[in-house]
Image (cartoon, rainbow, N blue to C red):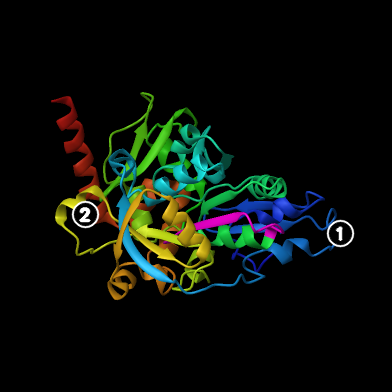
Amino acid sequence: MKTVCAKDMCAGCMACINMCKKSAITIVDDYKTYNAVIDEVKCVNCGLCEKICPNVKCVEQVNPIFWKEGWALNPEIRSNASSGGIASSIIYSFIKNGGYVASCMLNKGEFVFELTNSTQRAEQFVGSKYVKSNPKTIYIDIERKLQEGKKVLFVGLPCQVAALKNFSRNQDNLYTVDLICHGSPSPELLKMYLKEKSVDIEELEGLNFREKTSFGLRSVGKNNGFPRIVDMYTYAFLKSIDYTENCYSCRYASQSRVSDISLGDSWGSELSEEEKKKGISLVLCQTKKGEELLKKSNVELFDADITRAIQLNHQLEYPSRIPSSRMFFFENLEKGFDFAMKKILPKEYLKNEIKIILSKVGIRR
């Protein structure tokens, strides 16, 4: 099997698929790993896939100019966001100033990237997404807009930002925001988990992974759904159990960043408890473009404690560590997601089942 980057190290950015003119590359997802596999019959050995792969060609990373924490001044934007709403505020401001924004949303059961200049459509970008997304043709779409002289803002994971920078030849009007990332599981794991709960992801209008400090899956919209509960899918994610292999050696988990702005949660902030409940974002600005984005956005920022920020966001120093239970999780996965979690964490699984029962009893009342 010939792969674009080292075997099992593919991040699933899919820039190589966007680049290949011969349609010779496919992503093979086996739950545990991603691999960008090359069809050697179709391949003409042009080497373009390797030139834009963020694991093969390193992208320049720079240290932040400043570290801040804060929130969107619009209370509705802040309320709807997982954290302080800084990302949404930047996105809406960018569109209102004539730009296009590319980010991730749930569409027909799949988390995909879309490019839009509609603030209404961009509302679908809101919220944390604890699953690998599918960029599809987003790199091509962005490059076309840039060639037309349009300004484009890309909001995604560091590996996706790096892939876009390798892909694009017209970066004067390109602005980038990366989301501080723990790692991400295969979307097939999410589908498996939901199916076990008799939920068809394709029938969901939306899927919420988190609200402020309340973690857990909750459906949005139709009746084919469920209330929020601390579920085993979320537990596996928070414990770094089910990420794809590459995430544990991510080269972009460091203080030096690939984007204009990096956003995350300002855990442990010393601002008031009231503000913490409303959500506080961590903001790292690396470039003049980043400063421009923040100045044009309706946000309030304060100096952040860098030491505390790094301590509580280890991805700013090193990738997530592989837990010892990960191997046993995947060994038992063929019998189901819940079975695998019950096998490796029986006490936690039982506690979660009790919470679900109590939650259902509470709903009936």
Q: How many marks?
A: 2
Q: Residue at x 57, y 41 (%)?
A: 114
At 32% across and 32% down in the image, what residue appears? 226
Visible in this render: residue 342? no
**Which label is found at residue 44?**
1
Q: Which residue is mark 2?
A: 276
Residue under the point 44% across and 30% down:
204
Apparent side of residue 245 relative to residue 340 in the rendered image (left or right): right
Circle 2: residue type: Lys
Check if residue 179 falls in the magenta segment: yes
Measuring from the top left, give residue 81's x and y in whole percent. Answer: 34, 44
x then y, percent, for residue 133: 53, 48
Cα distance between the residues tagged 2 and 1: 55 Å
With respect to residue 350, does 49 lie above or below?
A: below
Q: Looking at the figure, which quarter contains the N terminus?
A: bottom right
Q: Residue furthest left?
A: 365
Range of magenta residues? 167-182
Mark 2 secondary-structure assignment: helix
Viewer-nearest of discs 2 and 1: 2
Helix, strand or loop under label 1: loop
Q: Residues within 10 Å of mark 2 (few under 14, many from 20)?
A: some
Q: Is residue 301 magenta?
A: no
Residue placed most toward the observer, 321 or 73: 73
Image position, residue 202 (x, y; %): 50, 31
Q: Position of residue 34 (x, y in %)?
A: 59, 57
Which mark is on residue 109?
A: none
262 or 224, nearer to the observer: 262
Point 20% across, 43% down: residue: 355
- Sequence-wise, the earlier of marks 2 and 1 is 1
Q: Are the residues tagged 2 and 1 within 8 Å (C-beta)?
A: no
> Would residue 93 be seen by someone viewing this image from the given angle?
yes
